[in-house]
Amino acid sequence: MECETSPASLHFVGVGGIGMSALAQMSAALGIRTTGSDRAAGSPENARIFHALEAQGIRIYPQDGSVYRDGAPEAVVYSTAIEEDNPDFACAPEGTVRLHRSAALEKLIALSHAENRIAVSGTCGKTSVTAHLAEALYHLGADPGMLCGGLVNAFVSETFAGNYRRGGGGSFVVEADESDKSLLNYTADTAVVLNIGTDHYSKEELAEVFRKFLAGARRNIVISDRVLDAVGPEACAGRNTVLFSAEPGGPEYRGFPVFRLDSCRVTPGGGAYCSFDGQSEIPLRAPGHHNAWNALAVYAALVQAGFAKADANRAVGAFSGVWRRFDRAGTLATGAVVYDDYAHNAEKIVSCADAARSISSGRVFLLFQPHGYGPFGFMREELFRVLQANLRPGDVFGLLPVYYAGGTSSFKPRAEDVAASYRALSGDAERYPYFADREAAGRYLLERTGKGETVVIMGARDNSLSIWAKKIVCSA
């Protein structure tokens, strides 16, 4: 299968996943016969994704190998989460080609003939910035393509779920995933790196991953000052590079032009605003310094792409958001306001806490469902450190059982054990509760929260959290 030749058919294993479903939509839009399978095809939390796939003519099979009864696809597309004994692997005819999703993405983007491939990476915010940049380009009349790990409100329709947009062949914005290092499997004309933190790897290992990613950028680099410090200026040599920074200073940093955040504020009514680069103040979709930071990154990328500063500023301010990014679910009977968010690593959880504090006159209650045993084990120490540093007296961080989506696992650490260790280390018996199920967590919130307080329900990959967030406010 050469990049220049369109495959006749592709089958996507785990097609209901947020990234795989976007890729399947891209395949179908390019005229490729596209099928998929998923163990959670009947789950109500995924209905909007499967409805969109079927509306685009993508046939969904049970994940039992039955797809091959209708003829073997030219290739089977899979992600790192798919186990080797999956029936769609085990039942495949001999010689069936397997494509990792990142390799499939590289091939499909080549088929789209995009003139400027923009890849957005970083440990935090890449989904939001991919969505924000694509929507800003749309408002500027650029008709961009996009493949994103979230459902972008501006691009949701009866036919499309919102995580893919075909575009007109100019710019194509794609979220580049560092979690399995698959971002190294494809190249970009413009590489954007937002930040460097702790999620799946140490900062030292991740810095090396980002150096390799940046080395593959053909023309342009948009990078934060902190990432530049981690990877070194030489990683950007020979490319048109601009920086963005939240620190005060001049128009350059380490020899590169830099755009700086000027202000970030929240009004008494909960509205959020920011300004940068001397431009007029713009509204933010949600509160939090991290959202202002994301907006700054988008602005820097637009100006580097040649848009006038004032036009870029207006386009950044028109962002309509991404599903499950600090979405207000409603108000409990106690008066506490409930938000739903996709946060799943230490930095994102703390950013949610910061956003919640900025609009709350009382305590903040964070309820977190870890999104896999491996990532949870990797982050447990860093998560405790940042929680201890950032939570205020009376704030609560509660753990729900780990969400297991399949794949090889030790099934450790258990959430109840981590919560117990946090209580022991902190000496605080109230700050780190564990809830055996959502019913117990809901009862706790109704017993403990009050007016002026804020609840944030957090977790990745399991969209039923969003349904639950709405259920507890409706039934309260």
Image (spheres, rainbow, N blue to C red):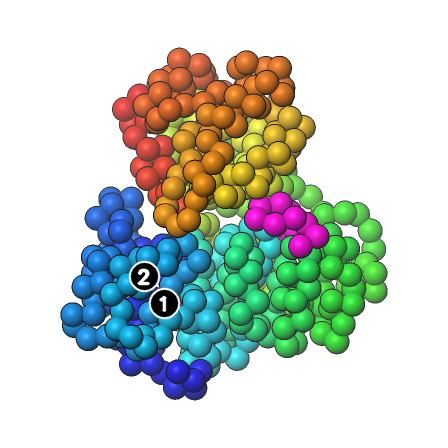
Q: Is residue 386 above or below residue 317?
A: above
Q: Picture quarter containing residue 109?
A: bottom left
Judge by depth and name the residue closer to the eye, 317 or 461.
Answer: 461
Quarter placement of the C terminus: top left
Q: Which residues are magenta?
A: 194-205
Where is mark 2, residue-wise? Answer: 13
Quick check: 435 above or below 60?
above
Does the magenta portion include 37?
no
Mark 1 and mark 2 in contact (Cβ < 8 Å)?
yes
| Number of numbered markers | 2
Q: Of the residues shown, which amino acid type is indicated by label 2?
A: Val
Quadrant where the image shows the N terminus: bottom left
* Residue at (82% x, 51% y) in the render: 249
Q: Amino acid at mark 1?
A: Val
Q: Which residue is mark 1?
A: 77
Q: Please tell me whether residue 393 is drawn above or below residue 320 in the rendered image.
A: above
**Residue 328 seen in the figure:** no
| Residue plotted at (35% across, 43% down) | 463
Q: Identify the residue shown where x is 49% and y is 34%.
A: 413
Q: Position of residue 80 (x, y in %)?
A: 44, 58
Name the N-terminal-most of marks 2 and 1.
2
The picture quadrant where one finds residue 424 is top right
* Element at label 2: strand
In-image side of 10 versus 327 (left or right): left
Q: Position of residue 268 (x, y in %)?
A: 56, 29
